[in-house]
Image: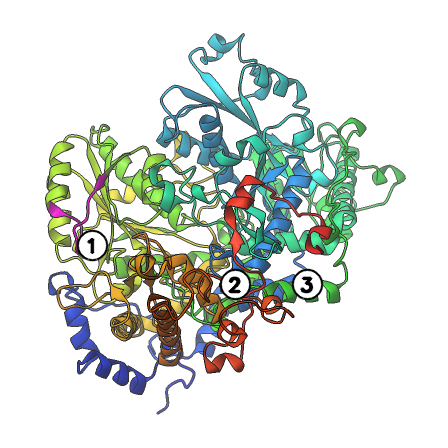
């Protein structure tokens, strides 16, 4: 009676007890636990309950938890950052923060695989690509990567692919040169990737690289360089002219990668103009908070001939069935579930939400506004440089944008003095400091910094008003000429533009998104509040540890909770995507084998039902993929596993298994499967994509997993954000603890982990970790366990309702499914010429996103309702699926035309339905309002079905002319 009234679990679970009772009645069982006993094999059920309480009162309310989180944030000290090194404070336009970052209409969207209902964010991503292509002067950009360091690693691998070292990645002997004045985190992450892929990485002075002479003197005589990477401006701020180096590289057949800064490129010559083949970097400083390291949108641009070699997603322009321009993901065969171990990368998530924020920053400011911001930053840096030089400090040449170095007697002493007045400088070495300024710098900041160095403070001087960029390095070419960057500079216009784009998408704000394996659940408002708090958002990732005490405590809590949930004692929060978690986990397994003198264990067994990124992750971690078959029930074929294990017994490194399986069942042989692998010297990697069916009921570590990655953007409520951000921490057994990812800033010889870092920041994307922390703390052990059970109830209820009209492809021993299920739609192609894509497009007319389509089995739909959807919403979706089945039946019975019917013509736009001419053999009402409740609220797909092959034949990946939309 006296407990909190605003408890969370009852709000998170979509259905109350009465609704749950009704669903159980449909299933013909008397209790939730009776169903769980039928679904989850007794042999894998955990013998002890979760112990996760954060506060003494396990029924705490949301307001109490938010207050506790505020206390944690307050323990972080927000200093003015002059560290630079790829991270800068920035001003997020409030109109962007409130209406994108804090808006569920944007942050709850799914990856835009269903392009017709993703037109808004696809347009925003095309703006991002155009911005990157224009600023780098390279014509083809992707729709974002994870962070700058991993983008550099992806560019290195891309150079190897372009130079013909094999479609599956690098081979021994491929060489790559990395300039030693790149950011340290970039060097270290590239070292990790090069080691795993067999790339011979050389780090040295770019001035020493001549590709022919001098190799022997530097120990490079056997290296065949396929590419090189330089930082522009470099990590110390200098703007280096690489033109001659590019000529030598191209003459030797090597590609040139430039890690660069988008804001600087508004003022300095872009990489494409001095010959670079690939440009990478981070868009963080374009309105995205530092967040102690992320999430941020990295970028990559390149020349058009390398389109099919570039990793990540590319948004392109095509046309719809009515000839209207429409956006969609281009070159879709790059996706991992199609190319598997031959994919260009294991990246299946980008940083979409952050890329959209950066693009809107550019749209809001336009080219003149960006130039004005950049010039102000450069002027402030030039003024400070001038003052320190006048004080007698050695500050190097006047050749920088926002960063320069200062020689001092004792760098640590000055850093301490700066911290005493609230500023963080960069200690490059014992006698060198780095100072970086940014958009937020003020005259008061200059005054304070000058006083730290013993001056009297800031004083204006006419010489100060000259920027520190030599004339021969200034940019003369135009950029951002498209009207979108000139049309929305007032807040009111940008607000309307943002909402216009939002209305062209489906998100969880409209309806459930029943994607199997993707766990699109409630991202509760109370969980999201802390993301933009300065105590979490404004910290530099390399700030001194004593300034991040709040984060440290939160990380320790979250890691311990994930260890308890998974049954694996050691946790790393560094991987900033599920794919990164897979990669890091496999690196740990590989390093473990090497530590035991068994480096030849490079075979990774992967079932055909494995999660989409598994094969590509295995390849970039240095494993050879061997496929294991599944039987007719969808389970791993144990006899085939035994054959493969025996065949590769001396080289067996790992088995990657998704559990419950991607077929939507708990495989009863999983204990034997893990035992077989262990008996033959292998390790078991469990993909955590389906952990939402396990939390509180069973633990991967108790089943036999040695590694499990955890998708925080699935099970633990971080929003999908349109395809990113995500987080993929890994939990490992005790014997693998020492092989968790290393420190991004530590030199390779000082790394405690033999695997090295996998992300640029030590904790991946820290500013979104409070979301999962708050979710677990609010739910508690009992709430999380209940959520798992209700997710299983919801899936079985839907499978039962749909089972008479659609065949449920896989079930367990008792005819039940786990938290998701697969509907077999393949026979409709024979009976009615209806493909699974037709069903997906028709769902748009009802205002629903399609389930996972044609995966893990072609011609099927995989449905996952999650625990946060209400019975009313489950019924609404089931009613729609039954209505679509009735439309298929009408075709089968010749009551509807075989080729001209609502499914084949879906989705139907408002323009099509309201046109003067309607020549379809079915009514406009059936096209637009096939069920009565659609008259209360109707989502209109903005475009008709998109012609994907046309878009790939005519690849356009930047903003098209406005007149194309007026035809």
Any mark on residue 157, and which?
Answer: none
Query: Is 348 within the magenta?
Result: no
Query: Which is closer to the viewer, label 1 or label 2?
Result: 1
Q: Which residue is mark 1?
A: 634
Number of numbered discs overlaid on the protein picture: 3
Quadrant location of the C terminus in the rendered image: bottom right
Residue beneath the point at 70% across and 38% down: 265
**Color scheme of the displayed model:** rainbow
Q: Looking at the picture, how far across and down is residue 340, in whole percent? A: 35, 41
Horizontal side, residue 516 vs residue 437: left or right? left
Residue beneath the point at 55% across and 43% down: 142
Proximity of marks 3 and 1: CB atoms separated by less than 8 Å: no
Residue beneath the point at 44% across and 41% down: 334
Q: Which residue is mark 3?
A: 497
Q: Earlier in the sequence, mark 3 or mark 1?
A: 3
Q: Looking at the picture, how far across and down is residue 335, in whole percent? A: 42, 45
Highlighted range, magenta? 627-638
Q: Which residue is mark 2?
A: 107
Identify which residue, 750 or 392, lies in the foreground.
750
Q: Main secondary structure of the magenta part?
A: loop
Identify which residue, 530 or 490, lies in the foreground.
490
Proximity of marks 1 and 2: CB atoms separated by less than 8 Å: no
């Amino acid at each position: 009676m006296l407990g909190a009234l605003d408890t969370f679990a009852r709000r998170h679970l979509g259905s109350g007890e009465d609704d749950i009772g009704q669903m159980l009645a449909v299933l013909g069982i008397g209790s939730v636990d009776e169903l769980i006993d039928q679904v989850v094999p007794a042999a894998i059920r955990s013998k002890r309950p979760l112990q996760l309480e954060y506060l003494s009162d396990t029924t705490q309310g949301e307001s109490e938890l938010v207050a506790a989180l505020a206390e944690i944030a307050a323990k972080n000290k927000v200093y003015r950052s002059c560290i630079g090194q790829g991270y800068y404070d920035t001003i997020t336009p409030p109109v962007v923060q409130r209406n994108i970052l804090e808006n569920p209409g944007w942050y709850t969207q799914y990856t835009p695989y269903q392009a017709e209902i993703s037109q808004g964010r696809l347009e925003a991503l095309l703006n991002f690509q155009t911005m990157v292509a224009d600023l780098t002067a390279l014509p083809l950009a992707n729709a974002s990567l994870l962070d700058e360091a991993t983008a550099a690693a992806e560019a290195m691998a891309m150079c190897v692919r372009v130079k013909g070292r094999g479609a599956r990645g690098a081979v021994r002997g491929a060489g790559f040169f990395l300039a030693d004045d790149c950011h340290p985190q970039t060097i270290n992450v590239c070292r990790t990737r090069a080691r795993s892929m067999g790339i011979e990485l050389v780090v040295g002075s770019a001035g020493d690289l001549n590709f022919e002479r001098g190799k022997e003197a530097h120990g490079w005589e056997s290296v065949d360089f396929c590419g090189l990477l330089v930082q522009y401006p470099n990590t110390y701020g200098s703007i280096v002219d690489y033109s001659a180096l590019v000529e030598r590289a191209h003459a030797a057949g090597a590609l040139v990668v430039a890690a660069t800064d988008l804001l600087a490129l508004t003022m300095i010559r872009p990489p494409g103009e001095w010959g670079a083949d690939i440009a990478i970097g981070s868009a963080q400083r374009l309105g995205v908070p530092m967040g102690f390291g992320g999430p941020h949108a990295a970028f990559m641009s390149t020349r058009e001939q390398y389109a099919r070699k570039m990793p990540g997603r590319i948004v392109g322009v095509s046309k719809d069935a009515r000839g209207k321009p429409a956006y969609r993901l281009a070159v879709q065969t790059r996706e991992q579930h199609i190319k598997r171990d031959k994919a260009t990368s294991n990246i299946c998530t980008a940083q979409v939400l952050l890329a959209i924020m950066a693009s809107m920053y550019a749209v809001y400011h336009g080219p003149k506004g960006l130039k004005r911001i950049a010039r102000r930053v450069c002027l402030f840096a030039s003024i400070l440089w001038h003052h320190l030089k006048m004080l007698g400090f050695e500050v190097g040449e006047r050749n920088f944008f926002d960063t320069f170095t200062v020689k001092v007697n004792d760098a640590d002493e000055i850093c301490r003095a700066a911290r005493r007045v609230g500023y963080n400088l960069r200690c490059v070495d014992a006698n060198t400091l780095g100072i970086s300024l940014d958009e937020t710098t003020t005259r008061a900041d200059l005054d304070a910094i000058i006083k730290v160095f013993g001056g009297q403070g800031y004083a204006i001087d006419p010489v100060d008003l000259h920027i520190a960029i030599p004339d021969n390095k200034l940019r003369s070419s135009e950029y951002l000429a498209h009207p979108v960057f000139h049309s929305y500079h007032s807040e009111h216009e940008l607000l309307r533009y943002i909402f216009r784009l939002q209305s062209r998408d489906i998100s969880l704000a409209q309806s459930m998104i029943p994607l199997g394996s993707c766990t699109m659940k409630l991202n509760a408002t109370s969980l999201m509040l802390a993301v933009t708090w300065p105590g979490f958002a404004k910290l530099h990732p390399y700030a001194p540890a004593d300034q991040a005490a709040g984060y440290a405590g939160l990380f320790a809590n979250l890691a311990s909770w994930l260890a308890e949930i998974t049954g694996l004692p050691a946790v790393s929060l560094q991987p900033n995507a599920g794919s990164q978690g897979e990669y890091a986990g496999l690196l740990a397994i590989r390093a473990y084998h090497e530590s035991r003198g068994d480096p030849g264990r490079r075979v990774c067994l992967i079932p055909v039902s494995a999660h989409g990124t598994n094969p590509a992750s295995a390849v970039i971690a240095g494993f050879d993929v061997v496929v294991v078959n599944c039987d007719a029930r969808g389970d791993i074929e144990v006899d085939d596993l035994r054959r493969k294990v025996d065949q590769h017994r001396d080289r067996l490194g790992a088995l990657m298994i998704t559990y419950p399986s991607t077929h939507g069942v708990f495989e009863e042989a999983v204990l034997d499967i893990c035992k077989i692998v262990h008996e033959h010297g292998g390790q078991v990697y469990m993909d955590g994509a389906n952990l939402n069916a396990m939390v509180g009921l069973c633990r991967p570590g108790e089943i036999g997993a040695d590694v499990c990655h955890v998708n925080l953007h699935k099970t633990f409520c971080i929003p999908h954000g349109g395809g990113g951000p995500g987080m993929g921490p890994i939990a490992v057994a005790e014997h693998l603890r020492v092989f968790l990812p290393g420190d991004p800033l530590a030199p390779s010889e000082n790394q405690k982990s033999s695997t090295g870092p996998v992300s640029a920041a030590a904790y991946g994307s820290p500013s979104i970790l409070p979301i999962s922390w708050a979710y677990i703390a609010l739910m508690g052990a009992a709430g999380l366990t209940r959520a798992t059970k209700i997710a299983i109830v919801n899936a079985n209820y839907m499978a039962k309702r749909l089972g008479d009209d659609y065949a449920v492809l896989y079930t367990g021993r008792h005819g039940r499914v786990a938290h998701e299920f697969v509907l077999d739609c393949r026979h409709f192609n024979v009976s009615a010429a209806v493909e699974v894509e037709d069903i997906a497009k028709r769902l748009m007319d009802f205002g629903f996103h399609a389930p996972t389509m044609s995966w893990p089995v072609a011609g099927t739909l995989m449905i996952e309702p999650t625990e946060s959807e209400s019975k009313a919403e489950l019924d609404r979706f089931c009613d729609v699926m039954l209505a679509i089945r009735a439309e298929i039946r009408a075709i089968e019975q010749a009551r509807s035309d075989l080729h001209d019917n609502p499914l084949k013509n879906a989705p139907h736009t408002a323009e099509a339905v309201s046109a003067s001419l309607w020549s379809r053999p079915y009514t406009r009402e059936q096209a637009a309002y096939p069920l009565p409740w659609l008259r209360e609220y109707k989502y209109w797909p903005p475009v008709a079905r998109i012609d994907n092959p046309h878009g790939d034949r005519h690849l356009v990946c930047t903003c098209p002319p406005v007149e194309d939309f007026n035809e």
